[in-house]
Amino acid sequence: MATTHDLRHRFDGESVGRALALVGERWTLLILREAFFGVRRYGQFVRNLNIPRPTLSSRLRTLVDAGLLVRVPYAHDPDRHEYRLTDAGRGLFPAIVVLMRWGDEHLGGPDGPPIVLRHNLCGEIA
């Protein structure tokens, strides 16, 4: 009789599940993508993503609470705020790039990738 290994322990503190619980929702990943491309202001997120304002407010609050974004006052108007990536937020950049590349390869349209990443210094495709 073959022995069955008990693998239930693999779910204890499982990192993929915890990460997905935080960033696995569509709008959250799109907000992070925009932040990587330099978007910082609430109105810019709304415009670029065409996201409902209550959804954006909720997702931004979650990302700030989780330490992926920080909310800071505008330099010229301290009553308004912008959102900046933290080190933890910037650490998700490779994951976003992998998703983008996978989408380009397996779900791309006939015109090729809509966004091509280039190295800032040399201009070559990254």
Image (cartoon, rainbow, N blue to C red):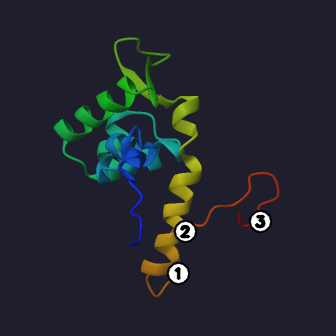
**Which numbered mark, 3 or 2, is in the foreground of this view?**
2
Question: Disc 3 designates what residue?
Answer: 124
Q: Is residue 108 visible?
A: no
Foreground of the two, 90 or 77: 90
- Residue drawn 29% across the image and 44% down it: 46
Outermost front residue: 1
Compare residues 84 and 8 and report the one nearer the observer: 8
Q: Is residue 24 above or below residue 69?
A: below
Per the image, the residue denoted by label 2 is 101
Please name the amino acid that badge 2 sits on. Arg
Q: Three-letter amino acid code at disc 1?
A: Gly
Q: Is residue 112 above or below residue 36?
A: below
Number of residues whose C-alpha sits closer than 10 Å to that of mark 2, classed few (under 14), some (14–19) or many (20 or more): some
User: Amino acid under label 3?
Assistant: Glu
| Residue located at (45% from left, 29% from top) | 69
N-term-proximal mark, 3 vs 2: 2
Q: Which mark is residue 112?
A: 1
**Mark 1 or mark 2, which is nearer the start of the sequence?**
2
The reply to whether residue 36 is in sight is yes
Q: Which mark is residue 24?
A: none
